[in-house]
Amino acid sequence: MRQMVLSILVENEAGVLSRVAGLFSRRGYNIDSLTVGATHDSRLSRMTVAVTGEENVLEQIKKQLGKLIDVKSIKELPSDSSVCRELILVKVAAGLNERQAVIAVADIFRAKIVDVSDGSLMIELTGNQAKLTAFIELLDGFTITELARTGITGLARGIED
């Protein structure tokens, strides 16, 4: 099993996300991560979809996506020739005694403290999935009260579009 990240250009129209997600659900494929946003061309949106599966299943996913009328292009984003990032926001319970220790962990990862209250800190961190996972693991001794992840987004390296 391996994870595949796809960058998919689609028509920027109502219902496209539903049709793409429906393709996955009808065939019983699980989506690890899905992000969607407009591109520099207002007629197109970029979907970044991360899926895990056997090689034959991953190939089938690409073929099925290519059959959708709304899909304009599909590009696999291999880790060695693309840049993929994810954003997380983490709210950590931290009184005066724990605050400096949490800030020290955030500093190691170049994370930003984006909110401070009497009993908690909110931290913003961007990076690859391995970096985010390592950060969360280092917070294991603290109480994470909330966590939100955006999902993977990415682009191929170089001048290809």
Image (cartoon, rainbow, N blue to C red):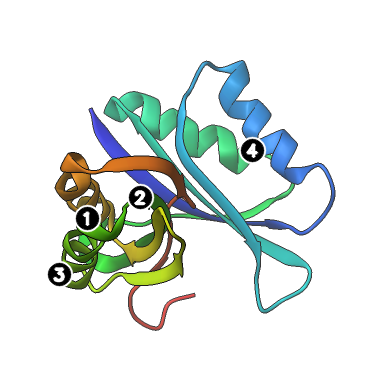
Question: Residue at horizontal 45%, vertical 42%?
Answer: 146
Q: Nearer the viewer, mark 4 or mark 1?
A: 1
State if disc 2 and disc 1 touch (CB < 8 Å). yes
> Dot 4 corresponds to which residue?
67
Q: How crowded is mark 1: few (under 14 residues within 10 Å), some or many (20 or more)?
A: some
Front residue of 52 and 160: 52
Can residue 84 be seen by looking at this rendering? no
Q: Nearer the viewer, mark 4 or mark 3?
A: 3
- Residue 158 relative to residue 147: left or right: left
Q: Position of residue 95 (x, y in %)?
A: 31, 54
Question: Residue at horizontal 52%, vertical 16%?
Answer: 28
> Dot 3 corresponds to which residue?
108
Instruction: State the quadrant of the N terminus.
Output: top left
> Dot 1 corresponds to which residue?
98
Question: Residue at horizontal 36%, vertical 62%?
Answer: 85
Q: In which quarter of the image is residue 68?
A: top right
Q: Which of marks 2 and 4 is in front?
A: 2
The amino acid on which the numbered mark 4 sits, given as a three-letter code, is Lys
The amino acid on which the numbered mark 1 sits, given as a three-letter code, is Glu
Marks 2 and 4, how far apart in space? 44 Å
Q: Where is residue 89 in the image (x, y as percent from the top left)?
A: 43, 56
Marks 3 and 2, how far apart in space? 16 Å
Q: Quadrant of residue 69?
A: top right
Q: Residues within 10 Å of mark 3 (few under 14, many from 20)?
A: few
Q: What element carries label 2?
A: strand
The amino acid on which the numbered mark 2 sits, given as a three-letter code, is Val
Q: Is mark 3 on a helix, strand or loop?
A: helix
Front residue of 8 and 138: 138
Q: Where is residue 91 in the image (x, y as percent from the top left)?
A: 41, 51
> Dot 2 corresponds to which residue?
92
